[in-house]
């Protein structure tokens, strides 16, 4: 019997699983951490404590709880939130906190400057992606401009997963799927770093490019002492959490779409050819010759947490979401005419507006907490439909939608998304998510599984059917108009110091 181990570092929690040959989970572990918001528009993690510290805790717990000898673990794979930006010195020590993915909007000026210098059209054509808050390149430039003394000490620019790989193996490596988010320093056609569009990042600062199931290295003696893993255990290159989530539910063929309900909604649609649309993101998929088109909101699960912490303080954390869900279900579709724009950290796709603001519109004295929470869930669902419509406009419609993530347990959220988007959603039996996908990728890397085996690892559990609601037919166009008619005001508010 051989085992594979997967660990995923999320925005608010890290999770890990130990899986035996055939997909059965023999142990699970989790550890929470906080997202640091030192100022509006910034989002950070502590790489040593939140990323590596969580990995060490989870790995040791998985081995202890399962009773499995570390030597029986055949391979390890990791994933993490991303794309992130983490500069390290020559000893691999972080120079600043890890700068998170698109929820961190600090590099807005650098995006403008790079677009002006290179040309937005040239960047889109060469890199496959427009510059947005999701792009790592502008954040590297921000770091260079604002911390020249630390830039002088920088030996490598990593992301969250490549930092984990380095701590485990001593190798600096990054997968192509993640690297495609480093615009304007990744060439989407050549699938290689490029440095002729701009010169702010020297080639030697970037990790080696690999595919997600390639073995990046093996657990070092030092990492073995910390984690409890056996020295020499193979470690894959790893990937971003959303990609591992997609793998965990069997996203495999062109037309398969993953809808991840996490701290953000993140969507991946596999395609048989590259999709170049400035409103979406594009990357090589985890395997050579395959492509993916991505989209994501800025705040989703994060917004439900915010609502719970502000408006359900009298409830314990264990019961709060259950109570709020029941209250939301008691409110009718449309939340009695209440609209929520869920742009509480700006917005990513498809509007890419760092100045967008969260809004409750239409409040009156009849509304209660349940109506407001339903409006939050319907606001996220409306923004998700906006993404689905964008895919359709770009010529990519999903053949099937597979839902995954903790938010799938939130029934009114899941149902509102199907009803508003008109998309049926498949929910698989195992909803563990990215760490389970990591364990599968580790099994693929050593030949312990084949790409189509996930169908038996994780069969279909249920299908959430889309229903038509007159309230949504009326309210969704108003949702779109509300943003269009207030975005100038939002930008003005963003300029207030």
Image (spheres, helix red, strand yellow):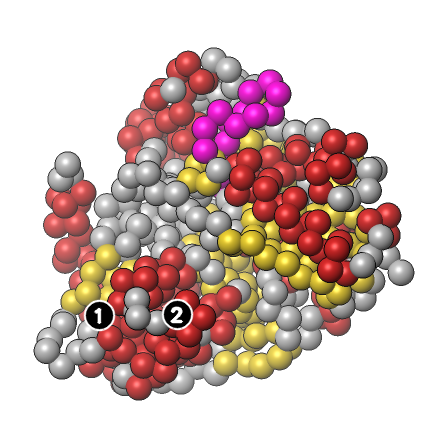
Across and down, in percent, residue 414 comes to: 44, 74
Residue that badge 2 annotates = 316
Residue found at the very far right of the displayed protein? 1
Kindly identify the residue that appears in the image at 40 percent across and 85 percent down.
Answer: 467
Q: Is 164 on the left or on the right of 299, as rendered?
A: right
SS for callout 1: strand
Kindly identify the residue that appears in the image at 49 percent across and 74 percent down.
Answer: 409
Which mark is on residue 339? 1
Q: Which numbered disc flags the more N-terminal residue, 1 or 2?
A: 2
In this view of the protein, can residue 319 be seen by the observer?
A: yes
Kindly identify the residue that appears in the image at 74 percent across and 31 percent down.
Answer: 222
Question: Distance of mark 1 from mark 2, alpha carbons?
Answer: 27 Å
Residues 16 and 85: in front is 16
Q: Are marks 1 and 2 in contact (CB under 8 Å)?
A: no
Above or below 118: residue 65:
below
Q: Residue 491 colored magenta?
A: no
């Amino acid at each position: 019997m051989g085992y594979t181990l997967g660990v995923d570092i999320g925005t608010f929690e890290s999770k890990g699983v130990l899986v035996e040959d055939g997909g059965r989970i023999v142990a699970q572990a989790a550890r929470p951490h906080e997202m640091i918001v030192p100022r509006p528009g910034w989002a950070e993690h502590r790489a040593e404590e939140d990323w590596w510290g969580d990995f060490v805790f989870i790995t040791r717990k998985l081995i202890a709880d399962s009773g499995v000898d570390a030597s029986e673990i055949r391979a390890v794979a990791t994933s993490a939130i991303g794309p992130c930006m983490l500069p390290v010195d020559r000893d691999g020590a972080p120079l600043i906190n890890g700068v998170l993915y698109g929820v961190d909007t600090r590099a807005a000026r650098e995006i403008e400057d790079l677009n002006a210098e290179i040309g937005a059209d040239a960047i889109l054509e060469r890199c496959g992606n427009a510059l947005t808050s999701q792009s790592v390149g502008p954040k590297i430039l921000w770091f260079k401009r604002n911390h020249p003394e630390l830039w002088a000490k920088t030996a490598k620019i990593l992301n969250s997963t490549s930092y984990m790989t380095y701590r485990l193996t001593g190798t600096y490596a990054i997968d192509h799927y993640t690297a495609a988010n480093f615009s304007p320093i990744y060439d989407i056609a050549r699938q290689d770093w490029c440095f002729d569009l701009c010169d702010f990042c020297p080639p030697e600062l970037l990790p080696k490019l690999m595919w997600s199931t390639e073995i990046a290295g093996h657990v070092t003696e030092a990492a073995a002492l910390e984690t409890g893993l056996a020295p020499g255990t193979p470690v894959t290159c790893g990937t971003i959490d959303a990609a591992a989530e997609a793998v965990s539910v069997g996203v495999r063929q062109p037309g398969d779409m993953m809808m991840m309900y996490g701290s953000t909604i993140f969507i991946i649609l596999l395609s048989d050819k590259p999709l170049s649309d400035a409103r979406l993101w594009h990357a090589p998929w985890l395997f050579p010759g395959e492509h993916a088109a991505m989209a994501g909101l800025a705040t989703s699960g994060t917004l439900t947490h915010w609502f719970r912490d502000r408006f359900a303080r009298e409830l314990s954390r264990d019961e709060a979401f259950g109570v709020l869900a029941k209250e939301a279900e008691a409110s009718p579709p449309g939340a009695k005419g209440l609209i929520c724009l869920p742009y509480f950290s700006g917005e990513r796709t498809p509007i890419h507006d760092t100045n967008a603001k969260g809004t409750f519109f239409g409040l009156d004295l009849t509304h209660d907490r349940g109506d407001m929470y339903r409006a939050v869930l319907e606001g996220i669902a409306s923004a998700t439909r906006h993404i689905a419509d964008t895919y359709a406009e770009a010529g990519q419609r999903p053949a099937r939608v597979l839902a995954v993530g903790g938010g799938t347990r939130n029934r009114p959220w899941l149902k509102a998304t199907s009803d508003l988007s008109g998309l049926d959603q498949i929910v698989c039996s195992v909803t563990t998510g990215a760490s389970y996908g990591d364990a599968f990728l580790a099994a693929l890397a050593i030949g312990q599984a084949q790409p189509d085996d996930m169908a038996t690892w994780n069969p279909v559990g249920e299908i959430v059917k889309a229903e038509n609601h007159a309230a949504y037919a009326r309210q969704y166009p108003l949702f779109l108009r509300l943003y269009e008619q207030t975005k100038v005001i939002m930008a003005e508010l963003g300029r207030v110091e």
